[in-house]
Amino acid sequence: MPKVVAAAIGLASIAAAVLAAAEPPAGAAACSGCHPTSARVVSPVVRLAGLDRAVIVRALQEFRSGQRAATVMDRIAKGFTDDEIQAIAAWYAGQK
Amino acid sequence: MRLGRRAFLRLAAGAAALLPAPRRAQGAAARVVVVGGGFAGASCARALRQADPRLAVTLVEANPTFTACPFSNAVIGGLRDLGAQQFTYERVAAAGVTLVPGTATAVDAQARTVTLADGSRLAWDRLVLAPGIDIRWGALPGYDEAAAARMPHAWRAGEQTLLLRRQLEAMPDGGLVVIAAPANPFRCPPGPYERASLIAHYLKTKKPRSKLIILDAKDAFSKQRLFQAAWTELYPGLLEWVPLSKGGNVTSVDAATRTLVTDFGRHTAAVANVIPPQKAGRIAEAAGVADRTGWCPIDPVTFESKLQTHIHVIGDAAIAGAMPKSAFAANSQAKTCAAAVARLLTGGVPSASKLINTCYSLVAPDYGISIAGVYQPVSGQLAEVPGAGGVSPANAPRATRAAEAVLAEAWFRTITAEVFG
């Protein structure tokens, strides 16, 4: 019995780990409210999927510091830490 | 470390409690039922399938067509067809969501079932309620469903939106339009003021001798300074805002004469738009997830109800702390909730996320303003991340306002493509 429980716990953690890898980091899921994921949408807002990680990091940092002109991204970038920006950039860079 | 047998069994029992329901152990798909196919519910259903394609996700929605509220003020102002607001669920179904047409009427939190109006029952392992708003009929004396046919609320888009537009079109030049705006909280905080703006635009263009009064149950509102500056610039002498402290609170209405009564006097309108007090959609109360305010307290990490376990509430129905009741917020909450539910159903522990809101309002077709915010769980509530968010700059050039009007439309195309496209 204990072996079965242990095996079940093992499977559950593997499943959770697989999910965690696919899951967007904090804040990233909200971006697609404005940044199109569908190729069919006509929008002046940049598509994030597959963008270079360093390009996303730099844009967010410059929006946050006010160096880059923005409409809303200056207000939104201020809500994210350096680590969060790195994680969001890495995640979007890894999308198809 | 060596565990005694008893301690190990306790530990094992604790771990077992964290395991998913027995159905998962047998290899059956965990079942999530989502009630309500608006921005919150449809987003969540799709995000659940994306988070874990093994989930059996069912979406319960009575209407075959969804009519979006954002931009419906442009329909009222004659700038847009209602068809541009309407979306079907074909692509939601194509994403692997089982659509069940119907209205949820009861929830059994113990048996974990939801009952539909036709008597059928759906079983769930986790239930997500996204019922939007219901009108609090009777809260404003004189305003009932019959009154809404003469003094439309147009706060749920569709026939009511068209009714208000037709009334404006039929009104002779020189008529008085009155909008009654409710106290907080309500769906779409800047909505009444965007509506006033776009009706004022219609009047200025088509019926310039007319007047518009907003009777407000509040002394302050969303994007207030930006709206008021734009009104002075665009609609001088046409649009008047009467706050609570100046007698703006509407205490009763008489639909037969289209009269709105305040503590300070009576206003008889040619067209009256009464935006009445609201509460969470009816199923929230039936499920026992609404509190005495009529809205639903939730955990800010998982959106699980604070009143019933295994039932989550997202969108306008939820008490989401500092987050406003907007389509963007509903979509952002839906994706956070979906990730948490997927984790919970595989025995994982949901992690705190950050959520975003961005709301554009049109003051004129080429004049947009916005508010944005970033939110995170703090002490059991969703709180604004300090230093972030805020409204469009006060003294921006018209080019900025025009750019925000373009972004507003792009936002609508993008979010509706994500949810329904």
Image (tube, coloured by chain):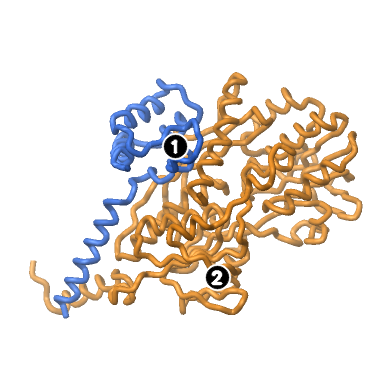
Chain colours: A blue, B orange
Name the residue located 33 percent from the left edge and 46 percent from the top edge. A25
Q: Is residue B15 visible?
A: yes
- Of residues B290 and B239, which is closer to you in this image? B239
Position of residue B201 in the picture relative to residue B128 (left or right): right
Quarter of the image that includes the N terminus of chain B: bottom left
The answer to whether B132 is drawn above or below residue B389 in the figure is: below
Identify the residue under disc 1.
Answer: B386
- Of residues B301 and A54, which is closer to you in this image? A54
Tags 2 and 1 on a common chain = yes
Position of residue B312 in the picture relative to residue B22 (left or right): right
Residue B39, percent across and down? 54, 52
For the residues labelled 2 and 1, the Cα–Cα distance comes to: 35 Å
How would you rate the neighbour count of disc 1 (Cα within 10 Å): few for under 14, some for 14-19, many for 20 or more? few
Q: Label 1 amino acid?
A: Pro
Identify the residue under disc 2.
Answer: B287
Name the residue located 29 percent from the left edge and 77 percent from the top edge. B26
Position of residue B4 in the picture relative to residue B272 (left or right): left
* Secondary structure found at label 2: loop
